[in-house]
Image (cartoon, rainbow, N blue to C red):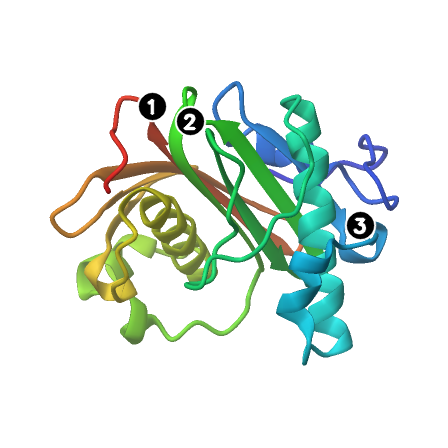
Amino acid sequence: MRWRAGARCGRGGVPDLAALARGLLPAGVAVAGGRIAAWQGVLYPQEEAALTRARAVRRAEFTAGRVAARGALAQLDVASGPLPRDPRGPVLWPDGVTGSLSHGAGLVLAAVARRAVVAALGIDIEAAGAAVPLDDIAGPAEIAALGGRDPVILFSAKEAAYKAQFALTGRMFGFRDLMLMLGDAHFTAQVPDGPAVAGRWLQSDGIVLTAATLPATVQPIA
């Protein structure tokens, strides 16, 4: 899938990344994003607290993520209050909402949904062609299944699947423990002693974009 000349552009004068992401996600998931520089704004004090020692690049990424997240939440008619970090890293979303943020290749994406629609989701955006330590993240069967595809696809799919399962299970483990089966434009990932995560991927001009979800029928783990 490639961006066409004259394709509909989103905020910041780039092709509509949110539309590309929506094509990878179920109905009812709201998405916002584009160039990081185009998604800047004012943070809440609770959010600023995470940036006391942040460099300019990190501040811009963090701010863009929160601004895009509030844009996506508004599509669900959810109030856009502070979105602080969980001590383990992810965003603390409003009650009844699940979501995911990603930054990469100068871009930001936010995806959110009500838990009645999906139990959890994960998105990831990466620069295509980047160096990937395959032996550190995947086993021989997973590497063989790549064929001639960009290894970034495998890494990004695992990142999206990991985010989705973490939102539900709160479990942390290595990427080699997450067994991923990569297909044409889709993938499935098996969480150790946990649920299977389904996802989709695309490689466009200069980026790899992945999205993974767990259905609403999967119950959160306390």
Q: Name the residue tied to disc 1.
A: 216
Tell me the residue at 54%/69% (across/down). Answer: 130
Which tag, 2 or 1, sits closer to the chain's start?
2
- State how far apart marks 3 and 1 are (Cα): 30 Å
SS state under label 2: loop
| Residue depicted at x 70% and y 39% | 70
Q: Residue flagged by tag 1: what amino acid is it?
A: Ala
Judged by depth in the image, the label closer to the viewer, 3 or 2, is: 2
At a point 31% along the width and 42% down the height, the residue shown is: 168
SS at mark 3 in the image: loop
Do residues under tags 2 and 1 come within 8 Å of each other at their CB atoms?
yes
Residue type at mark 3: give it.
Trp
Viewer-proximal residue among 44 and 143: 44
Numbered disc total: 3
Residue 173, located in which quarter of the rendered image?
bottom left
> Where in the figure is residue 41, as x and y percent of width and height?
83, 52
Name the residue that disc number 2 marks: 115
Residue at the spot of label 3 = 39
Residues 184 and 23: in front is 23
Q: Nearer the viewer, residue 193 or 176?
A: 193
Q: Is mark 1 on a helix, strand or loop?
A: loop
Disc 3 to disc 2, how far (Cα)?
26 Å
